[in-house]
Image: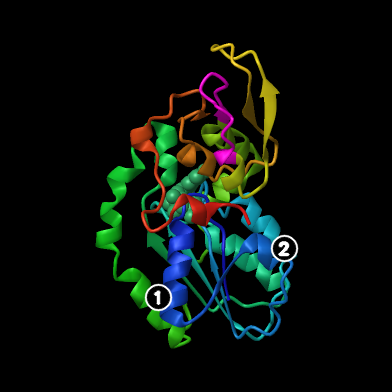
């Protein structure tokens, strides 16, 4: 079983491709915490790197997983460039459950966080062509049950970014917020939010003086940026900067309906 976490579809797409090439199935990490995985022979985990670490949700969900101790376990990280501690931190959690990670690898994909720095993630689609053989190589390794540790060690950047003092400085960098003047209350953001962290609240005081609902992001945000990238009105902004339609990205193999929270 391949367990995934995904905000803009890169990890979902990689999980799907690995499932096809290794004759396996995929399951959201959110569902996996309630599933019986103890009879699985192979456990894969596919999740992104955020600030050189695993997303907070992946850490929390990994702690809740009940996994077999004798399965072949692998971690694949689709990331913009550097994984930092993204493998190491989860490996430590699994180690405490007596689950050994046999294999890990990263795959470079367009970096969805580029939008937060005013850059276009779509300008990085060249990575799909450049690294197109990587997933086949990884699938071959998994099928052969190879043991290898690519990028799975403690990284200095990951270690630094996990320090509370640095986290306090980095986390606000990509914190999304809804611009009430642009939000039309369509609810797309709350349907793609994996954390179920967005609600619609009635509102009559927007600049159009129209009565509608607007979205409000709660305090469980893990900054996957799904709301920023999928909003049809570009109403979800990062650090008050205008979100450009041109800079909105999601993995080209993945459609909005694939991302809807189940
Ligand atoms: C908040 C945030 C922080 C990120 N930090 C990193 C990082 O430190 N290193 C990196 O290589 N990519 C980083 N990325 C890029 C993601 O790892 C990459 O876009 C990933 O493929 C997203 O997966 P998804 O499309 O399944 O959500 C970051 C993305 C976000 C949203």
**Residue 186, visible in the rendered structure:** yes
Residue at image position (67%, 70%) is 94
Q: Residue furthest front?
A: 211
Kindly tell me whether mark 1's CB lies below 8 Å from ligand 1: no
Relative side of 7 to 108, left or right: right
Classify mark 1: helix, strand or loop.
helix
Work out whether residue 235 or residue 169 is closer to the camera in this orientation and state it. Answer: 235
Left or right: 92 as drawn, with respect to 173: right
The residue lying at 41 percent from left, 48 percent from top is 250
Comparing 83 with 228, the one in front is: 228
Residue 27: % across, % down: 59, 68
- Residue 251's label in the rendered image is none
Can you say whether 248 is above or below 65 in the image? above
The one of 199 and 115 positioned closer to us in this rendering = 199
Span shown in magenta: 177-189
Disc 1 designates what residue?
A: 138
Asked whether 224 falls inside the magenta stretch, the response is no
Confirm whether residue 151 shows in the render: no
User: Can you say whether 204 is above or below 132 in the image?
Assistant: above
Secondary structure mostly seen in the magenta stretch: loop
Q: CA distance from mark 2 to mark 1?
A: 25 Å
């Amino acid at each position: 079983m391949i367990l995934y976490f995904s905000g803009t579809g890169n990890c979902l797409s990689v999980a799907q491709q690995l499932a096809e090439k290794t004759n396996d199935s995929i399951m959201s990490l959110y569902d996996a915490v309630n599933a019986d995985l103890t009879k699985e022979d192979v456990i894969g985990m596919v999740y992104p790197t955020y600030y050189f670490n695993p997303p907070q949700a992946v850490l929390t969900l990994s702690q809740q997983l009940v996994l077999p101790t004798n399965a072949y376990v692998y971690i694949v990280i689709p990331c913009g460039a550097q994984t930092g501690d993204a493998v190491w931190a989860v490996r430590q959690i699994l180690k405490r459950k007596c689950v050994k990670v046999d294999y890990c690898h990263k795959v470079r994909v367009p970096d969805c966080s580029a939008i937060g720095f005013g850059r276009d993630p779509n300008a990085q689609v060249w990575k799909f062509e450049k690294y197109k053989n990587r997933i086949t190589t990884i699938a071959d390794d998994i099928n052969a049950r190879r043991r290898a540790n690519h990028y799975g060690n403690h990284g200095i950047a990951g270690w630094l970014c996990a320090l509370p003092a640095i986290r306090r400085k980095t986390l606000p960098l990509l914190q999304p917020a809804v611009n009430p003047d642009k939000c039309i209350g369509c609810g797309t953001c709350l349907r793609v939010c994996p954390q179920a962290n967005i609600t619609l609240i009635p509102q009559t005081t927007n600049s159009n003086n129209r009565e509608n609902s607007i979205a409000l992001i709660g305090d469980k945000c893990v900054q996957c940026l799904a709301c920023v990238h999928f909003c049809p009105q570009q109403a979800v902004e990062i650090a008050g900067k205008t979100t450009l339609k041109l800079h909105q990205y999601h993995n080209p193999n993945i459609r909005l309906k694939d991302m809807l929270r189940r």
